[in-house]
């Protein structure tokens, strides 16, 4: 819960503005939009996992708006590996990554992330 942040869009941009995110997120990086179709993206990104080898992901990424305009959800899961060339990173599987960002009833913004990766 972020009681002093009133804008869902501000929190969402912290996750989704990849150029800005590269300035502060030192674990997930190298985000690239490989394809965009009907507001759905195929993304490539790398996760640093010291002391293990880096992991890279090719995912389908989509954004949903809350039906009462109170927030949003972005969801991603692994896409076909053939959509991005292999690198030195270990290609990982993202079974689910869902982040919900909503207005909190007592003010501010709340976000919840659920992830399952291999």
Image (cartoon, rainbow, N blue to C red):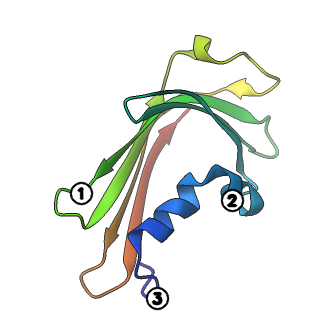
* Direction from residue 58 to residue 19 in the image, left or right: right
Quadrant (top left, top right, bottom left, bottom right) of the N terminus: bottom left
Name the residue rendered at 73%, 54% in the picture: 22
Q: Hey, which quadrant is residue 70 in on the image?
A: bottom left
Which residue occupies the extreme top position in the image?
82
Of the numbered discs in the image, which one, if any, rests on residue 66?
A: 1
Give the position of the C terminus as an image quadrant.
top right
Work out whether residue 3 or residue 53 is closer to the camera in this orientation and state it.
3
What separation in Å lies between label 2 and label 3 (alpha carbons)? 21 Å
Query: 25 or 71: which is nearer to us?
Result: 71
x then y, percent, for residue 11: 49, 68
Q: Which mark is residue 20?
A: 2
Residue 76 percent coordinates (x, y): 44, 37
Neighbourhood count class around disc 2 (C-alpha, 10 Å): few under 14, some 14–19, many 20 upward: few
Q: Is residue 69 positioned above or below 52 on the image?
A: below
Where is residue 32, by image quadrant?
Answer: top right
> Which residue, given by chain and number where applicable, does mark 3 sit on?
4
Disc nearer the start of the sequence (2/3): 3
**Residues at marks 3 and 1, CA–CA distance in whole angstroms:** 21 Å
Secondary element type, mark 1: loop
Residue that extends furthest to the left in the rendered view of this protein: 68
Would you call the spot at circle 1 few (<14 residues within 10 Å), some (14-19), or many (20 or more)? few
Residue at 59 percent of width and 54 percent of height: 17
């Amino acid at each position: 819960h972020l009681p002093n942040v009133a804008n869902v869009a501000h929190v969402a941009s912290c996750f989704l503005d990849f150029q800005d995110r590269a300035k502060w997120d030192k674990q997930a990086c190298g985000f690239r939009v490989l394809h965009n179709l009907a507001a759905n993206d195929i993304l490539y990104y790398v996760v640093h996992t010291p002391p293990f080898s880096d992991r890279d992901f090719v995912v389908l990424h989509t954004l949903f708006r809350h039906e009462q305009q109170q927030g949003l959800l972005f969801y991603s899961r692994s896409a076909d590996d053939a959509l991005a060339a292999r690198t030195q990173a270990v290609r990982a599987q993202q079974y689910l990554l869902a982040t919900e960002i909503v207005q909190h009833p007592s003010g501010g913004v709340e976000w919840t992330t659920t992830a399952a990766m291999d």
